[in-house]
Every structure is written in C-alpha cells, then in structure tokens.
Amino acid sequence: MESRTFSTESYFQTQRPPSGLAERTQKMTEFVDKWRAVPNQRVVLVTSGGTTVPLEANTVRFLDNFSAGTRGATSAEHFLSAGYAVIFLHRLHSLRPFSRHYSHSLNPFLDLLSVVQSSSDTAVSEHAKSLLPILQAHQKAQSEGKLLSVDFQTVNEYLWLLKSVTSVLAPLQRRGMFYLAAAVSDFFLPEDRIAEHKIQSVHGTLSLEMDQVPKVLKPLVQEWNPEGYIVSFKLETDSTLLIPKSRAALSRYGHQLVIGNELHHRKQRVVFVEPAHPSSTPRKARADERIREVETPPLMSGDGVDSFRETWLRLEDYEGKRTDGNPESELEIEELIIKELVQRHTSWIEAGYSSTS
Ligand code: PMT
C-alpha cells in the first residue's frame, strides 16, 4: 500500500481527537485566562519528551522518539524562576520540573527517605541542604499556581493538544511564548491502517509502511498563533547538518528562533539560529565572537529568510561563573538558554507595542 502525505487539515479531519481533550483544554483555558488578567504576565508553553506511535489499536507495541524530557523539565524550572507562568506539555512519565532532581536513576527514592530521616534529626545533612532551594522553588510555583502540567503519550495526542493549546494562548498575543522541545515522531500509522489487535509473530518478519506526520509548525506560526514568540528545536546526530537544517527550518516556517542541538553534546552547547535582522531584536555588536552573521541564498521560495545570525551558548564559556549568583547548584545549559530567551521575548513584546502605536 502506498504511503500518503497528510496535510495538517486532512490530518485533523481524519484522525480522531484523544479522549479527555475537552477537559484538558478547559484546564489550559482557565490557566491562561487567570494569567492573562495579570498585567504584563508572560506565559510559556514548554513541550517536552518523545511522542509514541502505536503499532496496534489495542497497543502492545509502539515506536518511540528519543527524549528523557531533561531539556523541557529543566527549562520549565528556569522559566518559572524568570517569572513566567508555564504550561508544561509533557510525555507521560518523562522527567518533570523539580521532581527531575529525584529521578530513579539519578537519586533513588530511598536516598530521599534518608534525607527526610536526617532532616528530623537535629543535624540536617549536606544533601538535604542542597535540596532546599529546589523545594522552595517548587513550593513557590505551587502556591502561585504558575505551573500547569498536561501529559501526552502518542503523537496523535500531542498534535491535538498542541493545536488546542495554541489557540488557547492566542489572546495573550506577544506575551505568549512557545518552546517546542518535544521530540515529535515523523511517521505514524493512520487509524484506517492500524491493526486492531496485537500483531502476530507467526509470519516471521514484520514490514511497516508508515505515513508522514504533517509539520504543524507552519500553521502554528502562520494561522493558529501569529503573535507568539516561537522557538523550535532541531536535533541532529551529524554536526555538519545542524546549522543548515536549523536555517532551513527557520526559512520554511518563518518563526523567530531555532535552537540547534547535537545529540551527544546537547547538555554542553547549543546554537541559536535566527533571522539576522528581525524587527524585534536589537542588533548586538558583531565583535562578540560567539555570534556570527551570514548571508546565504534563499533556501525556500515565499517567506524564506535569507540571512541568519548564529549564537553559540557553551557551558565551558561560563566555567565558574554562575548567572543566578547561587554557588551551590551546578550550572545547566538551560539556565543560559532561558536567560537569552527572556531578553529576546522582551524585545519581541516591545516591538509589538511600537508597531501598534
Ligand atoms: O529531553 P532530552 O533528553 O534532554 O532531549 C532534548 C531534545 C534533544 C529531544 C530536544 O532538545 C530537541 O532537540 N527536541 C526536538 C527534536 C526533534 O525531534 O526535532 P524535529 O526536527 O522533529 O522537530 C522540529 C521542531 O518542530 C521541534 O521543536 C518539534 O517539537 C516541532 N514539531 C515537529 C514535528 C511536528 N509534526 N510537530 C512539531 O511541533
């Protein structure tokens, strides 16, 4: 059977919405309405973790995309400390803000119990002390109601939720940011082609013909939420592809920023690729050696960007220099990413005021 290419429109016409979509949309709407009423409050959508593609309707097996959810969960914490209200749209059971510091692999639960035990003693252990800032940040987010977590598992759930939260965020206009760190499946099995029951192994080999998942970034940027500040990610394993593919994505979708990351060094360095002369971003001195501006022939027709600015963020450049003044915690690349993004978002908001005045 021939594989088909779904447009975004035909995808949503033919693939059923997941159960519970209306309830989850309602929760996200209430959250956004609450924060929209607060003057100047910014809201960010963070997508995180990998999407699955079930091979059977009664799912026993599925294909998965690589992502532990570290990028999304860590970034959400830094957005909260920058004052943002955060919708954390994440893969079920992937890492989550705050509790990520206590994942089973990094810090088993029994360690936590020993911390609790030592805290009840007069001498609080060093380990317990190091957890206090995390606990306080978590309690602050809870008491202010600034973190809303919504989970997904399959690529279909992700796409429906993304579409719906995008419209929910639209009234925020430029105060809304999208930080699309989820690793989204490129292929899927549509409803009319998926096996209902567990695929039997009696035939020996298994051949699969999958259809392409439509790229939803284009309608997101151009129709669903044209005012938001939109950041997508590009993951590559071949470092020579990182910049060309990030530029191509920017040119194709016309959004504000692509963050390129290479699989094996994603925790040490990332590259920001953005249009060289966006109206909302003041140009920085070119003397900064991390920043490079290049002119290239257009990659795409239409609204393609043809000159780019690339800014590398590397942990090694910040050795020993924390940006939040807290010498206790380890510097994570997400802290640098969010700091840069907040500045760009501010410029984006200010440019919106000047274009309407
Ligand atoms: O969680 P970690 O283990 O820390 O890993 C983090 C990460 C490496 C997964 C993350 O930093 C990252 O790079 N995420 C994007 C990886 C990816 O799959 O890129 P893509 O080329 O498929 O998609 C590009 C962008 O479009 C992404 O922002 C994606 O969320 C979005 N997209 C893609 C396809 C689609 N149908 N809809 C989308 O919204």
Image (cartoon, helix red, strand yellow):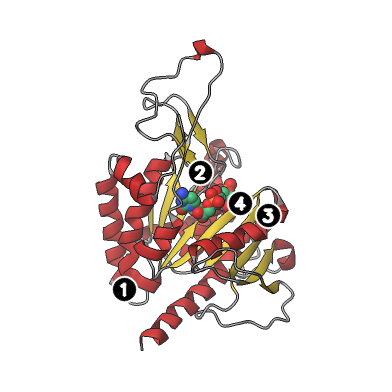
Tag 2 residue: 186
Percent across and percent down for residue 313 are 67, 65
Percent across and percent down for residue 55 are 45, 28
- Of badges 2 and 1, nearer the viewer stands 2
125 to 328, vertically: above or below: above
**Numbered disc 1: secondary structure:** loop
* Tag 4: amino acid: Leu
Percent across and percent down for residue 297 are 64, 69
* Between discs 4 and 3, the one toward the N terminus: 4
Res 215 seen here: yes
**Numbered disc 4: secondary structure:** strand
The answer to whether marks 3 and 1 mark residues whose Cβ atoms lie closer than 8 Å is: no
Q: Find residue 106 and report its image quarter.
A: top right
* Between discs 4 and 1, the one toward the N terminus: 1
* Alpha carbon separation for disc pair 2 and 4: 13 Å
Q: In the drawing, what numbered circle is on residue 235?
A: 4
